[in-house]
Image (spheres, rainbow, N blue to C red):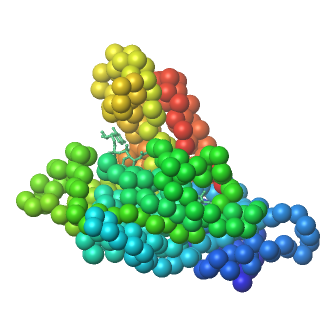
Amino acid sequence: MIEENISLKKYNTFGIDVMARYFARVASVDDLCAQLEFTPPSTSSQLLPRLILGGGSNLLFTENFDGLVLKNELGGIEKVNEDESYVYIKAGAGVNWHQLVIHCIQNNWAGMENLSLIPGNVGASPMQNIGAYGVEVKDVFFELEAFHLSDKKVVTFNLQECEFGYRESVFKRRLINQFIILNVTYRLNKVPVFNTSYGAIEQELAAMGVTELSIQAISQAVIHIRRSKLPNPVEIGNAGSFFKNPEITAQQFASLKNDFPAIIGYRLGVDKVKLAAGWLIEQCGWKGYRKGDAGCHANQALVLVNYGHASGSEILDLSESIIASVADKFGVALEREVNII
Ligand code: FAD
Ligand code: EPU
């Protein structure tokens, strides 16, 4: 069923109040094909802009959406295969990510525990190769099925074909707006390989008094850290990190370190360093800044927030000012992680 003139406020974690001209939920491929045929009476053959919506936790709406929003609600979690070392778990794009993580942890299938409590749905997890606490989705990814919007065919993508990078995939670049992800199959370990390389996890496990590592304990530690740092979108509108952590050359880093000895950077291979964007933004004085209802979070400068009634444009303007001041002070270009619609 197609609904008309629907507020999207409850469908995006920033809580931005914009309208969708048309809105439909899709719970099967047949549903999807039927909705894609939809053309509003007055526009005849004109192709309507479409937006695929998951949990709305990585989007910033800056205006009303004058097209068709398709809320992906394809469900289901099933074990599709297993061998001596791995289980293969297929989940529908509309499954809530954290519920899938919990399901895997309860079954002692290991690999997703560091990715506990990331908002959003399965379908978006490969879009930007979600990551946290030393693990990215690519580390547990096996394959996905996606629907090609013009060919109207289902195509399977393996790990290489997704071209995963840091908060990147082929679906954000070369094949942008061409596919709807229908389901994802993850490959999980029967025998866990614990990843506590992220310092805060070790500290939290110690504070919890954990002496024997388990995927359950790591998940709990990650949940505690996240709750202490990141604003809960139910209380304060946000979409997590608004910007990516910028990657620069080792030479650029050495020069910045000379001028700013406290700068935070993580070595990536021989010649690349990833900078902590939160630190750069904090040093420019933005942490805790608020203008109207748009702000920069007081505990995590990388997270922009909506205290209630900010518009998407106000948040976007704030992000532009932050980008300009970081470029001015450090000569570093910040790139937005959140999708601007
Ligand atoms: P949406 O916001 O609905 O969509 C995101 C993009 O993907 C849009 O362009 C949309 O059109 C597209 N899309 C969605 N579903 C499909 C589909 N089935 N097929 C094709 N395109 C699709 N991210 C991290 O990586 N790590 C974190 O630690 C993290 N922490 C967060 C903390 C908070 C408090 C919040 C609010 C967000 C955080 N995020 C994090 C960002 C966000 O949770 C992820 O990007 C998540 O994967 C978005 O999922 P979603 O279903 O909400 O996607
Ligand atoms: N920092 C500051 N000031 C701040 C914020 C951070 O100095 O205001 C410093 C911290 O002290 C720390 C460093 O920056 O030394 C890194 O901070 P943190 O561990 O909080 O992680 P982050 O780099 O800010 C990234 C991801 C998060 C992910 C966490 C944990 C990106 C863009 N963000 O944040 O992902 O949860 O690491 O792995 O890579 C997201 O993508 O939405 C997201 C929340």
Q: Residue at x 58, y 62 (%)?
A: 156
Closer to the camera, 189 or 265?
A: 189
Q: Residue at x 52, y 35 (%)?
A: 334
Residue sticking out furthest to the bottom: 1
Give the quarter of the figure containing the C terminus.
Answer: bottom right
Q: Residue at x 59, y 38 (%)?
A: 320
Say above or below: 151 vs 318.
Answer: below
- Where residue 231 sits, quadrant-wise, is bottom left
Horizontally, is 15 left or right of 34 in the view?
left
- Where residue 110 sits, quadrant-wise, is bottom left
Closer to the camera, 321 or 225?
A: 225
- The reply to whether residue 301 is in sight is yes
Residue 132: x %, y % from top left: 36, 52
Closer to the camera, 23 or 249?
A: 249
Say above or below: 263 vs 76.
Answer: above
Q: Residue at x 92, y 70 (%)?
A: 44
Horizontally, is 333 left or right of 176 in the view?
left
Residue 96: x %, y % from top left: 45, 71
Residue 212: x %, y % from top left: 10, 61
- The reply to whether residue 116 is in sight is no
Tally of marks: 0
Give the quarter of the figure containing the N terminus.
Answer: bottom right
Ligand 2: quadrant of the figure:
top left
Residue 260: x %, y % from top left: 35, 21
